[in-house]
C-alpha cells in the first residue's frame, strides 16, 4: 500500500493506493458517516459495486445510483437525477458521496457533492488509470452541449482510495488512454521515469510497476496544483499535449478516440514542435517506438485537415490574438508556455501528419 497527502486550498486529503482496497472501505474511512451514497456507472457497477458495499458492512444507510457508462452521462440530466436521489435518500451535511469509477463518474459525482446542500463530503474511488489524473486536483464538472466541462467547480475530495486490482479489467484502449496522462507526468518530471514508461509494452503490464507510476503521476499533479490550484500559472503545464488532443477529439467526433490516446499523440506533436522552435533535445524516437508498440491510433491523423484542426485549437482556452499558446518542452522536466502564430502551427501540423503517417506505413 502506498499513501500520500495532498494539500488543497480548503483541506488536506490522503490518497491511498493498493491492491484490494475496494473491499476495505470502512477501515479506510477517515470518519464515520450516517449515510453514504455510492455513484457508479453501468460497467463498473457490474464489476465492483458489490465488493465496495461488502466493504461497508455496518452501514444500514448505504444506497447507490448507477448512471450509464460513457461521457454522455456527464450531463445536466444525470446531474439532476443524482440530486433527486440525494434528496430521496435524505442525505444531510454529515453524509458522504462516493464516486466509484473512472474520470466520468468522478467529475459527475464530485460536482453533485460540491453543490448538494452547498457541499457534502466526497470520496473518490478511481477505477481507471486515467483517473490518477482526474481524481486529484479538485476539478469537478459536467458537460454542456456547447463544450466539455463548462459547468463545474473546484472541490477536492476528502479521500482518494485507489484499488489497483480494478485496473486489471480495463480494455486495451483505456490502458492506452491512462498511459497518455502517465507519460505526460513523466515528461514533466524526469528522464529516468520517462525511460521506464517508454520501455513499457502494455501487453506485459506489471501491476506493481503500474502502482508506482500512478503514485509518481499523482505526486507530479499534486505538486503543481498545490502551487496553482486555480490554473493561473504552472497548472497550465498540465495541458502538455492537450491543445492538439482536444482538437483531435472534437474533429474525429467524441468516442472515436479516447482522451488519453489523443493526449499521447498531442504530446508527440508538442515534442516535435519543441525541437523546431526551442531546439530541445527530447527522446522523440523512443516515444515514436512506444506509440507504435502500444498501438496508439496515429493512423487516425491521416484524413485530417491541418487548417481545420488549428481553427479548433483557437476555440480552446489558450488563444490570445492570433497566437495559440502551446505547452512545449525545453527538455524533459522543463516545460514552457510558448505563443505560436497560427500559420506556423498549420505548417508544423502538416509536416507532423506527413511524418507520422509515413512512419506508420513504413513499419
Ligand atoms: N477533473 C479532472 O481534473 C479531469 C482530468 C482528466 C480527465 N477528466 C475527465 O475524466 C473523464 C475521462 O475519464 P476516464 O478515461 O476514466 O473515462 P470513463 O470514466 O468514462 O471510463 C472509461 C470507460 O472505462 C470503463 N471502466 C471504468 N473502470 C473500469 C474498470 N476497472 N474495468 C473495466 N472498465 C472500466 C467505464 O465504464 C467507461 O466505459 C472525462 O470526462 C474527462 O473530462 C477530468
Ligand atoms: Zn487530460
Image (cartoon, rainbow, N blue to C red):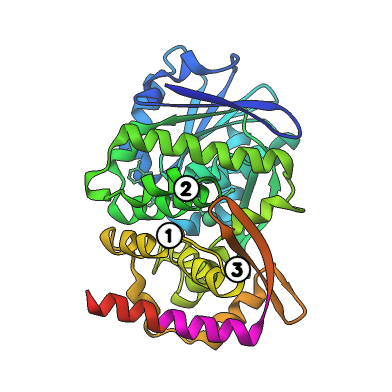
Which residue: 63% across, 26% down? 13
Per the rendering, the mark at residue 145 is 3
Question: How many marks can you see?
Answer: 3
The first of marks 2 and 3 along the sequence is 3
User: Dot 3: within a 10 Å radius of its alpha carbon, few (fewer than 14), some, or many (20 or more) residues?
Assistant: few
Which residue: 38% across, 61% down? 287
Magenta-highlighted stretch: main secondary structure? Answer: helix
Residue 76 visible? The answer is no
Is 77 drawn above or below residue 306 in the view shown? above
User: Dot 1: within a 10 Å radius of its alpha carbon, few (fewer than 14), some, or many (20 or more) residues?
Assistant: some
User: Dot 2: within a 10 Å radius of its alpha carbon, few (fewer than 14), some, or many (20 or more) residues?
Assistant: some
Which residue: 31% across, 35% down? 207
- Please tell me whether mark 1 or mark 3 is closer to you in this view: 1
The first of marks 1 and 3 along the sequence is 3
Per the rendering, the mark at residue 191 is 2
Residue 124 location, x and y as percent?
53, 34
Q: At numbered mark 2, what does the secondary structure look like: helix, strand or loop?
A: helix
Q: Are marks 1 and 2 in contact (CB under 8 Å)?
A: yes
Query: Quadrant location of the C terminus?
Result: bottom left
Is 340 drawn above or below residue 21 in the view shown? below
Magenta stretch, residue numbers? 340-353
Per the rendering, the mark at residue 283 is 1
Amino acid at each position: 500500500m502506498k499513501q500520500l497527502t495532498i494539500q488543497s486550498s480548503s483541506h488536506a486529503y490522503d490518497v491511498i493506493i493498493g491492491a484490494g482496497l475496494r473491499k476495505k472501505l470502512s477501515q479506510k474511512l477517515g470518519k464515520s458517516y450516517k449515510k453514504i451514497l455510492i455513484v457508479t456507472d453501468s460497467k463498473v457497477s457490474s464489476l465492483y459495486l458489490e465488493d465496495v458495499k461488502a466493504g461497508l458492512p455496518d452501514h444500514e444507510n448505504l444506497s447507490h445510483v448507477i448512471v450509464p457508462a460513457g461521457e454522455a452521462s456527464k450531463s445536466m440530466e444525470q446531474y439532476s437525477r443524482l440530486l433527486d436521489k440525494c434528496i430521496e435518500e435524505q442525505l444531510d451535511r454529515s453524509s458522504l458521496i462516493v464516486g466509484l469509477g473512472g474520470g466520468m463518474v468522478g467529475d459527475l459525482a464530485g460536482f453533485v457533492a460540491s453543490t448538494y446542500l452547498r457541499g457534502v463530503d466526497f470520496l473518490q474511488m478511481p477505477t481507471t488509470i486515467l483517473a490518477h489524473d482526474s481524481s486529484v486536483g479538485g476539478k469537478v464538472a459536467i458537460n454542456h452541449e456547447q463544450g466539455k466541462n463548462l459547468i463545474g467547480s473546484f472541490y477536492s475530495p476528502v479521500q482518494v482510495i485507489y484499488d489497483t486490482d480494478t485496473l486489471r479489467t480495463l480494455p486495451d484502449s483505456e490502458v492506452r488512454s491512462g498511459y497518455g496522462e502517465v507519460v505526460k507526468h513523466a515528461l514533466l518530471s524526469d528522464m529516468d521515469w520517462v525511460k521506464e514508461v517508454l520501455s513499457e509494452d502494455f501487453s506485459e503490464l506489471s501491476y506493481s510497476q503500474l502502482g508506482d507510476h500512478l503514485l509518481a503521476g499523482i505526486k507530479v499533479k499534486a505538486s503543481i496544483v498545490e502551487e496553482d490550484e486555480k490554473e493561473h500559472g504552472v497548472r497550465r503545464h498540465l495541458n502538455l499535449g492537450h491543445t492538439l488532443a482536444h482538437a483531435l477529439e472534437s474533429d474525429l467526433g467524441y468516442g472515436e478516440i479516447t482522451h488519453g490516446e489523443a493526449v499521447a499523440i498531442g504530446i508527440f506533436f508538442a515534442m516535435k514542435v519543441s525541437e523546431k522552435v526551442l531546439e530541445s533535445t527530447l527522446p522523440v524516437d523512443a516515444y515514436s517506438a512506444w506509440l507504435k508498440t502500444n498501438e496508439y491510433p496515429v493512423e487516425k491523423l491521416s484524413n485530417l485537415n491541418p487548417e481545420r484542426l488549428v481553427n479548433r485549437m483557437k476555440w480552446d482556452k489558450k488563444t490570445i490574438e492570433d497566437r495559440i499558446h502551446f505547452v512545449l518542452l525545453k527538455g524533459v522536466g522543463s516545460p514552457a508556455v510558448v505563443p505560436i502564430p497560427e500559420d506556423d502551427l498549420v505548417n508544423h501540423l502538416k509536416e507532423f501528419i506527413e511524418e507520422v503517417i509515413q512512419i506508420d506505413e513504413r513499419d
